[in-house]
Amino acid sequence: MLEGLYAGSLEDAATRQNSVSIAELEARVSKAPIPMDAIKAFSRREQIHVLAEVKRASPSKGDLAAIVDPAALALQYQTAGATGISVLTEQRKFKGSLADLQEVRSKTTVPLLRKDFIATEYQLLEARAFGADIALLIVAGLDQSTLRRLMRFTLELGMTPFIETHDRSELERALDLDAKFVGVNARDLSTFETNRDLFGELSHMFPSDVIKVAESAVRNQGDVQHYRDAGADVVLVGEALVTSDPSVTLASFLEVK
C-alpha cells in the first residue's frame, strides 16, 4: 500500500512538473512570507495541542466527508483552538490537492502541514510555494540518506520537518537525525490496523526537547487523554473531526490537560 501511495504521488508530481518548473516554484518561494515557526507554536506543554486535519478520504475508510470548502473547515479548526492544521494534498486515495493547501493558507494564521507522500525536493518546493510551514517525511518510505537529505532541504526552505514513525527502529532513525518534531503513527501501514498503545511503548525514547506527536486512533476525548497520559504533546486528528461537529469535538479534546 505504501509503495503504491508513493508511486502515485511521485507520478502526479512529475505531471505537475511538466507544467510548473523548479525555477518557477523557486521564484514563488522567494516571494512567499517567511514560514511560521512550528516548533515554537507547539512547544507549550501545559495542555495537549491538536493538529487538526482537512481529510476527505483515506485508503482504509474510503470517503469520510465531502469538504467542499477546506478553508472554511480550517478556519473552524483555528477558531476552536487548533494549534496547527494538516492538509492532505494526495489526490488519489485521500482526494486532496495543493489547491486545498493554498485555500487554507489564505484564510488561516496557524502553522500548516502539507501531508503527502514526499520523496523529492520538488514536492518540498511545492509545499513551501503553496503555503506550508511543515512538511511530512515518512521514515517507512525513505532510506536514511534520502530522509537526511530531505530533512536538510526542508530546513533550508525555512519549514519544519515532521518525521513520522511506526515502530522502534523507525523512531531510532528519526532521532539519529536530530529530528525535533516527531510522530508515532498507531496505524500499521502493512495491515492498516491500529495499536493505540504503541505511542506509550515508545514515548520513553524521546529526548525532552523533541515534540511528541500521537497519530491515528484518536476517536474521542478518552483517546486524547490516553495519549496525553502517555506523554504526547500533540495529537494529529482527522477522521474524528470531519465526521462530527468539528468545533465541539475539538473543544472537548482541548479540555485534556
Image: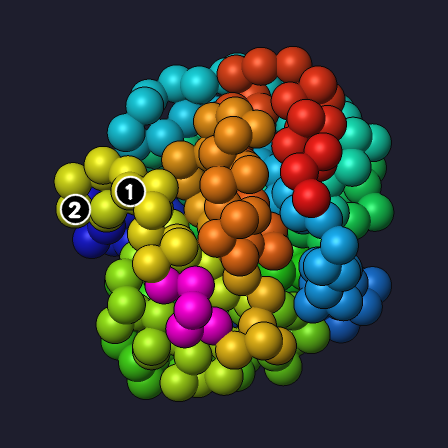
- Residue under numbered circle 2: 190
Q: Secondary structure at mark 2?
A: loop
Residue 220 lies, with reference to residue 145, above or below; the image says: above
Q: Position of residue 132 (x, y in %)?
A: 66, 56
For the residues labelled 2 and 1, the Cα–Cα distance comes to: 13 Å
Which amino acid type is marked by label 2? Answer: Ser
Q: Judging from the image, what secondary structure is the residue with disc 1 in? A: loop
Q: Main secondary structure of the magenta part?
A: helix
Res. 120 visible in picture: no
Residue 122 image position (x, y, % from top left): 48, 66
Quick one: label 2 or label 1, which is nearer the N terminus? 2
Image coordinates for residue 137, horizontal then vertical, percent: 43, 64
Residue assigned mark 1: 195
Quadrant of the frame with the C terminus: top right
The residue carrying pointer 1 sits among few (fewer than 14), some (14 to 19) or many (20 or more) residues within 10 Å by Cα, namely: few
Mark whose residue sits in front, 2 or 1: 1
Could you tell me which residue is drawn at 58 percent across and 14 percent down?
Answer: 244
| Magenta-tinted stretch | 202-206
Of all residues shown, which one is farthest toward the front? 229
Which residue is at 43% across, 63% downward?
203
Disc 2 vs disc 1: Cβ atoms closer than 8 Å? no
Q: What residue type is disc 1 on?
A: Asn
User: Does 89 sit left or right of 30 as displayed?
Assistant: left
Tell which of 240 and 139 is nearer to you. 240
On screen, residue 118 versus residue 129, left or right, reads left
Could you say which quadrant of the image residue 171 lies in? bottom left
In the figure, 246 relative to 223: above or below? above
Q: Quadrant of residue 87?
A: top right
Q: Which mark is residue 11?
A: none
**Which x, y percent locates residue 20?**
55, 57
